[in-house]
Amino acid sequence: MNIDGRAWRTIWLEEGGRSVGVIDQTLLPHRFSTRSLTTLDQAAEAIATMVVRGAPLIGVTGAYGLMLALQVDPGDASLAAAFEQLNATRPTAINLRWALERVRDRVLPLPPSERATAAAAAAAAIAEDDVAMCSAIGDHGLALLQRLAAERPPERQHEPLNVLTHCNAGWLATVDWGTALAPIYKAHRAGLAIHVWVDETRPRNQGASLTAFELGREGVPHTVIVDNAGGHLMQHGRVDAVIVGTDRTTRTGDVCNKIGTYLKALAAHDNGVPFYVALPASTIDWTLADGLAEIPIEARSPGEVTQIQGLALAGAAAAELVTVQLPPRGSAGFNPAFDVTPARLVTALITERGVAPASEAGLRGLYGLEATCSEPSPAAKVDQ
Ligand code: MRU
């Protein structure tokens, strides 16, 4: 996607494949800076500290992290240890385990001397598949948005279609395009008048920092709102649809996404607003049936709740990124990073294979009866 007229992806190979380039998302939107990851430890740290984040991008970074580990030591013990180290960085997004398993299963049968090269090819394939899947999600979502826009009453036809999104499920969360934002980008490029309500998404503000940054660079009209405003806007008819991403989706259609997603789904349900979840196959955990009981919810540092980062507008630190304390020092903070929205609150899932009900029958209808957690869904197999 575009930054100042230049097309970017979120992750790329450098130095003939001995280094992995990423955008440092902890500094956005006020600083655009890239980082080079040259070791397994650096890749693991980039995921854990959210230099890179978003379920699909975490997976691709993990895959390249295995490659970096195998460049140093391609033995079985090194592979197993690197897998465990990377897999432990963030527990909720299933894309991480999915991508690590895909690389491990590709290289394990090979002699050690061939493993690093094979891991690089496997990681690159995961990245390319992600781009293709997100683009296809965008195509299916575009058709859905065009239908929603056309079905509005005549007196509302002149207004832009108002879509609310939570967190960042745009290109910064993937390799390119995004999941929830892909239909929005495709709609904007197709000339559909669209406006996005951007939840700021406390505590880390991925909406205010990242989604607003992305949409602004692509020229998509948007407005940042506090997380508590969504229900009010829905009650007053100012939201035509909600589209969010997901970090793990059970085979029964429960979706786990950034904390606060569940409250948006409740408000949407109460107000008759369609609530869509956009996801690639790599986000489906076919082993799980009950999201609330079975999906591990990452608990992050309370400091993310009690402190906030922003750009100083005045004073000695003007134009610097500063961190300030919010509650009294000593007040405890609690920071569950994700919540589970039950399938019954999800209008439909938007996948690379089409739009389906959030149910086991809906997902099996798209992916088949034999689909499993580790099954890749490469672009070549996408049914359009
Ligand atoms: O904690 P984050 O920023 O990694 O959480 C990201 C989200 O919750 C996204 O909505 C999700 O990964 C879907 S991304 C396409």
Image (tube, grey):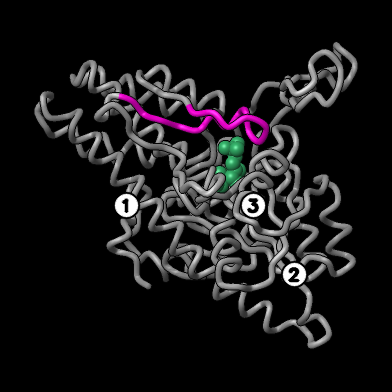
| Closer to the camera in the image, 230 or 132 | 132
Disc 2 under 8 Å from ligand 1? The reply is no
Q: Nearer the viewer, mark 1 or mark 2?
A: 2
Range shown magenta: 19-34
Q: Is residue 203 above or below residue 178?
A: above
Instruction: Give the secondary structure at mark 1.
Output: loop
Ligand 1: give its quadrant.
top right
Residue at the bottom extreme of this rendering: 154
Whole-Å distance between the Cαs marked 3 and 1? Answer: 30 Å
Q: Nearer the viewer, mark 2 or mark 3?
A: 3
Label 1 sits on residue: 376
Whole-Å distance between the Cαs marked 1 and 2? Answer: 33 Å
The answer to which of marks 3 and 1 sits earlier in the sequence is 3
Q: Amino acid at mark 2?
A: Asp
The answer to which of marks 2 and 3 sits earlier in the sequence is 3
Label 2 sits on residue: 240
Q: Main secondary structure of the magenta part?
A: loop
Number of the label disc, if any, that sits on residue 323: none
Left/right placement of residue 282 relative to residue 200 reads left
Q: Give the class, few, some or many, for how many residues have Cα within 10 Å of label 3's Cα (few <14, many ≥20).
A: many
Picture residue at 32% right of the left edge, 52% below the top: 376
Instruction: Give the secondary structure at mark 2.
Output: loop
Number of the label disc, if any, that sits on residue 215: 3
Q: Amino acid at mark 1?
A: Pro
Instruction: Give the secondary structure at mark 3.
Output: helix
